[in-house]
Amino acid sequence: MDYKDEQSQKPLPPGEAQMANEEKPVDLSPQPQSITPHFGGFWMRVWAYLFDVLVIAAINGLLVYPLLRLTGLTEPVGLFSIAGIATSIVFLTYFVLMTKFFQQTLGKMVFGLRVRSLNGSPLSWTAVLFRELVGRYVQSVFTIFGLPVFLFLYAVTAFTPKKQGLHDFIADTAVVHERTVMASLNSSYKPLATDRV
């Protein structure tokens, strides 16, 4: 037996064995990540909606009410009056057309939000009409003493994983931040034994 073979078969003293184990290379390769959309939260969407309400009020003030005065159709404002119907048409048309052609309203543009289909396809007319007509009609048209009865359904947005409101569930859509995404570690990733904490 050679002297070198004897050296390689001798166990290392405890201190040297620990140092040999610590010198193993650490895997510093990037860990697999999953990229998910950064869904628009409740308050951000509230601010965007309030901005849109101001835009719609301006449109009504500049176009609808002057036209009604010119035609002599002024009457007490109510949901089923001519003015109420005209302003409702402006409200719904604004949301439908802006969402279909831009995937965002002016309020969403200001706050960096965009409506996306959950299956990744472009927004179809069917999805937009269900989202903006059916969903918004259900949530905001029914009123008692001037207060929308189903307005509380907007609060659902704060408690769902993808921050979806009732109208998002109806159309299978979600509102996302257009310039940010969320990165999280892939759940299938298993840390290596050599990874340090």
Image: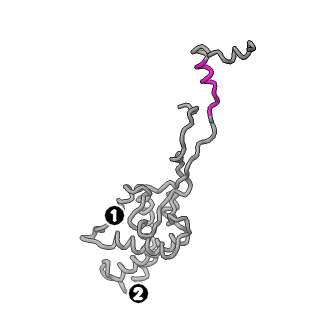
Counting from the top left corner in percent of width and height, residue 87 is at 40, 76
Task: Please name the amino acid that badge 2 sits on.
Answer: Thr
Q: Give the range drawn in magenta.
A: 17-26
- Whether residue 53 can be seen here: no
Seen from the viewer's position, the closer of residues 85 and 169 is 169
- Residue at the location (63% across, 21% down)? 20
Would you name the residue on which mark 1 appears? 153
Quarter location, residue 85:
bottom left
Counting from the top left corner in percent of width and height, residue 51 is at 44, 62
- Whether residue 101 can be seen here: yes
Find out whether residue 22 is within the magenta segment.
Answer: yes
Crowd class of label 2 (few under 14; some 14 to 19; many from 20; radius 10 Å)? few
Q: Nearer the viewer, mark 2 or mark 1?
A: 1
Local secondary structure at mark 1: helix
Task: Please name the amino acid that badge 1 sits on.
Answer: Leu
Find out whether residue 183 is within the magenta segment.
Answer: no
Q: In this view, does 111 lie above or below 30?
A: below
- Residue at the location (37% across, 73% down)? 137
Display coloring? one colour
Q: Is residue 135 above or below residue 32?
A: below
Would you name the residue on which mark 2 appears? 71
Q: In this view, does 40 lie above or below 54?
A: above
Counting from the top left corner in percent of width and height, residue 180 is at 55, 52
Crowd class of label 1 (few under 14; some 14 to 19; many from 20; radius 10 Å)? some
